[in-house]
Image (cartoon, helix red, strand yellow):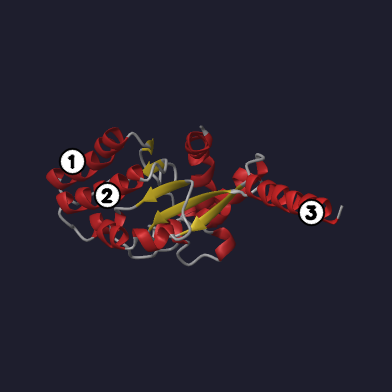
Amino acid sequence: MRWFHVLVVAALALSAAAGSAIAKPMRLLVLGDSLTAGYELPGDAAFPAVLERALQAKGVDVSVINASVSGDTASAAAERLEWALGEGADAVIVELGANDMLRGIDTGVTQRALDDILGRLRARNIPTLLAGMLAAPGMGTSYEQGFNAIYPELARKHETVFYPFFLDGVAQKPHLNLRDGMHPNRAGVEAIVARVLPRVEELLAKAAAP
């Protein structure tokens, strides 16, 4: 009887562990720059935190990890990808390229770095949402065309969920940006999350699929 009792306790422990694993929230990693890092905003107002609350309000059990670094170029993010993944991720949002554009980095360099990131995530079977960026006015027609073409091309190549312009509805709207006119304020982040949410839900559905 004592051995039977031990087996029952062990079985219950294993069952509890399995239940705990099943109940574990999805890990959604945001790999980006200052636009998602929460530049000059409190932590609870940064894009990952606002997105997590919006998803949880819809009943999605998810933990959104802020792996964004202000000032990062696409190449810098590619170099720290393995570190950023840490314990792994069920899905990733890639929001990069704005700093490349503002610094006038060759579009081929930006494209190769993003291609590398998306390729490595795809090799791990991690569903990805690619958030696009558009060149600012004054960069020149040739640069603008080359830069803007990067995102739809890579989205098709890697079959990612695609959100064409991360700052859609927020760019060049003073009341939704900080004084620098480039970074979203608290209201701006809320507006971005509201617009991108359907695409994020599509991403998580892919991640949850067998």
Name the quadrant containing residue 134.
Answer: top left
Q: Which of 13 and 82 is in front in this view?
A: 13
In three-dimensional space, the C-alpha distance between marks 2 and 3, rounded to whole angstroms, equals 50 Å
Q: Which mark is residue 9?
A: 3
Q: In this view, does 83 lie to the left or right of 143?
A: right
Residue 139 at what x, y percent from top left? 19, 51
Under circle 2, the secondary element is: helix
Tag 3: Cα neighbours inside 10 Å, few (<14), some, or many (≥20)?
Answer: few
> What residue type is disc 3 on?
Val
Please give the residue where the numbered disc 2 appears in the rendered image: 114
Label 2 neighbour load within 10 Å: few <14, some 14-19, many 20+:
many
Type of amino acid at the residue the image marks with label 2? Leu
Q: The residue tagged with tag 1: helix, strand or loop? A: helix
Residue 55 picture quarter: top right
Disc 1, disc 3: CB below 8 Å? no
Q: Give the percent coordinates (x, y) of residue 172.
A: 38, 49
Q: Position of residue 144 (x, y in %)?
A: 19, 45
Q: Can residue 125 be seen in this view?
A: yes
> Which residue occupies 64% across, 44% down?
22
**Residue 170 placement, left or right of 201:** left
Disc 1 and disc 2: Cα gap in Å?
A: 17 Å
The foreground one among 200 and 105 is 200
* Residue furthest out toward the left: 142
Residue 145: assigned label:
1
Frontmost of labels 1 and 3 is 3
Q: Which one is in front in this view, the residue at disc 2 or the one at disc 3?
A: 3
Image quadrant of residue 186? bottom right
Q: Is residue 16 above or below residue 155?
A: below
Q: In this view, does 3 lie to the left or right of 84?
A: right
